Image (cartoon, helix red, strand yellow):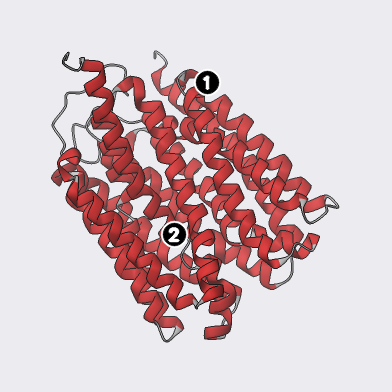
């Protein structure tokens, strides 16, 4: 029997890291949507408005933003593995806390705990992927990472709503906490695969090396990536929390199909990321891929806002919008990778993805008010507008990066 060739060993090692990181990432995204699918139950339970429920998400993401920006430095200093385990533990505790809450403000307190847990994932995940996965498979690693995130978002309504209908919203949240701790147990059993070795800087990365803890903040492309993820987060937040209900009000979609709209969007987004992983093999075209994907998504959002549609068409269009957005996912991550200086992965991803949390914190405050005032068409038109801004933002990242690299 012949010994495994090095490529086989490398593939097995890469697949193990990608699988573990992806599974943890799934729980992060799953936990972000623990409350939104249960808004109809929570609204009645605590006698609050959609804007007040949206504020719980704002709390979660404001805390996550602050933790994310800081945790990148901690990850670079102490390594990603213990930070990852701590984050998963806090997400599980938050889910159990939501389930036992007897007031709106108890929910808000556990939203803080959940935000702390969620804030560590992007610095941890991208540090592990960029440092442990071989370069030829990095595009596929980003693809799987995005797919598992989308599946986590899809799993939340698909799991929580049926359990809430069959039992109660509290039972649904208890099940969510059990799932978080089950994944933590799997990672603990495979913790040796998540150890991190020190690596040398690679050629072709941004010129500004990590000669100081904050030197990466001088790179304009980093801040353009931050802005891109801010707008991207607003798009995500609208799709997750408000667009399905807005479409239901405009097109008479039966209530059981509303949760399916989000699940279909996320599953199709995961499918789009499979194709996007292959397209991202050529990093030079990542901005064009992002532009095309979100251009199609914006056209679908406009159709949902302005068209006269049969109710069965609405979930189909959510699937098309999700697939188009998913194609852009791996190329979106390459925008950041190409703007990251050596040995600063945790810090850069922490700051850049803080834009994601800020956008998700701001969005419910604006679009929740539109929902409370019955501006359902305005919600979907705003979604299309934000997707258009995303396209311009992606090309702005490219412009700033090319200007920085041009000879003086």
User: Residue at horizontal 18%, vertical 31%?
Assistant: 211
Q: Which of marks 1 and 2 is nearer the N terminus?
A: 2
- Asked whether residue 387 is in view, the answer is yes
Q: In which quarter of the image is residue 341?
A: top left
Which residue position holds label 2?
32
User: Residue at horizontal 27%, vertical 35%?
Assistant: 16
Q: Is residue 362 left or right of residue 117?
A: right
Q: How far apart are marks 1 and 2 (CA)?
A: 31 Å
Which residue position holds label 1?
285
137 or 241, which is in the foreground?
137
* Residue 84: percent from left, percent from top: 24, 51
* Residue 268: percent from left, percent from top: 58, 42
Judged from this view, the residue extending furthest toward the right is 308
Q: Quadrant of residue 220?
A: top left
305 or 265, which is in the foreground?
265
SS class of the residue under badge 1?
A: helix
234 or 6, which is in the foreground?
6
User: Residue at horizontal 53%, vertical 45%?
Assistant: 232
């Amino acid at each position: 029997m012949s010994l495994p060739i090095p490529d086989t060993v490398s593939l097995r090692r890469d697949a193990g890291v990608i699988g573990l990181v992806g599974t943890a990432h799934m729980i992060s995204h799953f936990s972000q949507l623990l409350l939104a699918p249960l808004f109809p139950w929570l609204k009645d339970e605590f006698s609050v408005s959609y804007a007040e429920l949206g504020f719980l998400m704002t709390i979660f993401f404001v805390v996550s933003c602050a933790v994310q920006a800081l945790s990148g430095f901690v990850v670079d200093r102490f390594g990603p593995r213990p930070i990852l385990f701590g984050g998963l533990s806090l997400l599980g505790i938050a889910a159990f806390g939501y389930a036992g809450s007897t007031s709106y403000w108890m929910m808000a307190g556990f939203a803080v705990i959940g935000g702390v847990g969620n804030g560590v994932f992007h610095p941890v995940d991208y540090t592990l992927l960029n440092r442990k996965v071989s370069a030829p498979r990095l595009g596929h690693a980003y693809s799987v990472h995005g797919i598992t995130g989308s599946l986590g978002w899809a799993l939340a309504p698909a799991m929580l709503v049926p359990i809430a209908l069959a039992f109660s919203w509290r039972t649904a949240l208890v099940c969510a906490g059990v799932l978080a701790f089950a994944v933590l147990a799997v990672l603990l059993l495979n913790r040796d695969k998540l150890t991190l070795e020190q690596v040398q800087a690679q050629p072709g990365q941004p010129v500004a090396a990590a000669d100081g803890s904050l030197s990466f903040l001088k790179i304009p492309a980093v801040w353009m990536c931050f802005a891109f993820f801010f707008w991207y987060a607003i798009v995500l937040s609208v799709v997750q929390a408000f667009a399905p209900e807005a479409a239901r009000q405009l097109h008479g979609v039966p209530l059981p199909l509303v949760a399916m709209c989000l699940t279909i969007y996320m599953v199709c987004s995961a499918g789009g990321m499979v194709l996007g992983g292959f397209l991202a093999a050529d990093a030079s075209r990542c901005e064009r891929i992002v532009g095309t994907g979100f251009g199609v998504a914006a056209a679908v959002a406009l159709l949902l806002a302005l068209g006269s549609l049969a109710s069965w068409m609405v979930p189909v269009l959510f699937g098309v919008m999700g697939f188009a957005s998913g194609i852009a996912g791996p190329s979106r991550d390459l925008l950041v990778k190409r703007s990251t200086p050596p040995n600063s992965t945790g810090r850069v991803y922490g700051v850049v993805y803080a834009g994601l949390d800020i956008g998700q914190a701001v969005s419910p405050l604006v679009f929740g008010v539109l929902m409370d005032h019955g501006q359902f068409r305005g919600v979907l038109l705003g979604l299309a507008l934000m997707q258009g801004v995303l396209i311009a933002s992606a090309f702005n990242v490219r412009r700033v990066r090319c200007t920085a690299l041009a000879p003086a």
